[in-house]
Amino acid sequence: MATRRRFRDLAELDAHLIDCRACPRLVEWREQVAREKRRAFADQEYWGRPVPGIGPADARLLIVGLAPAAHGGNRTGRMFTGDQSGDFLFSAMYLAGLVSQPHSVSMDDGLELFDTRITAPVHCAPPQNKPTVEERDRCSCWLHGELELLAPTVRSVITLGAFGWQSTLRTFGALGWTVPRPAPKFAHGASTILTRGDATLEVFGCYHVSQHNTFTGRLTVEMLVDVLRAAAASAGIDLGE
């Protein structure tokens, strides 16, 4: 597990994160993809570095994914930006009233997140979208630091997939939050309450927005919108409905 350090704010954390080279396999892969590129993006300069979270520093709702996509976030430098999984996520967030527009294609496209931040347990694109346990643990210092900085305001979390669910519960436990025992199992629509002193926080499970899930209908936009609205209500976000 990487050494943990305290950061003054998310801007400082992100500035250090994008220079991380702790995982040799991930560094090699992200940079190889950035050099070779996909034909459709041959004229673009790829980001090719760790991808930081996006959204306000005082977010009340946090969405935790898996890792950046090789030709999505690894290309654009922003989580879930520039790929079909991101299109699915942002269209649902737009319907729920949590973003300013239904599509995200680049860092400078004007996208704004309302009371919501998006991050991941692994910040580099992994081969076949499968980070190893060692890579997850080495990257955990960044999620630990991010959750610590968000703790004053965040009141609900949506984890996209079992990987994010397990990483989120483990990290909150390390930060002193009481996680139910036995540890709650991931399922779409599952939720569990964490406590720390007088503070409470609700964690929601949702199928990942991978093409495997969305193309097969295992996860529909309506299903995702339902989870987003439930988590927003738990966080006390007024969606104006």
Image: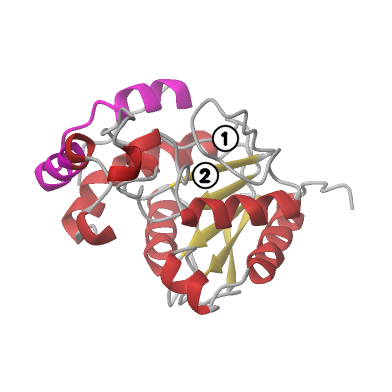
Residue 204, image quadrant: bottom right
In this orientation, does residue 35 appear? yes
**Amino acid type of the residue tagged 2 in the rendering:** Ile
Q: Residues within 10 Å of mark 1 (few under 14, many from 20)?
A: some
Colour pattern of the rendering: secondary structure
Answer with left or right where residue 58 lies relative to residue 139: right
Spot occupied by residue 206 in the image (x, y as percentages of width and height):
54, 68
Q: How far apart are labels 2 and 1 at the CA level?
A: 6 Å
Spot occupied by residue 197 in the image (x, y as percentages of width and height):
59, 50
Picture layout, residue 131 above or below residue 117? below
- Outermost residue toward the right in this view: 241
Q: Nearer the viewer, residue 34 or 189?
A: 34
**Residue placed at 49% from the left, 78% from the top?**
216
Q: Name the secondary structure under disc 2.
A: strand
Predominant SS of the magenta segment: helix
Is residue 11 located in the magenta-colored stretch of the structure? yes
- Of the numbered discs in the image, which one, if any, rests on residue 55? 1
Residue corresponding to mark 2: 118
**Amino acid type of the residue tagged 1 in the rendering:** Gly
Cβ–Cβ under 8 Å for marks 2 and 1: yes
Residue 16, image quadrant: top left
Is residue 177 located in the magenta-colored stretch of the structure? no
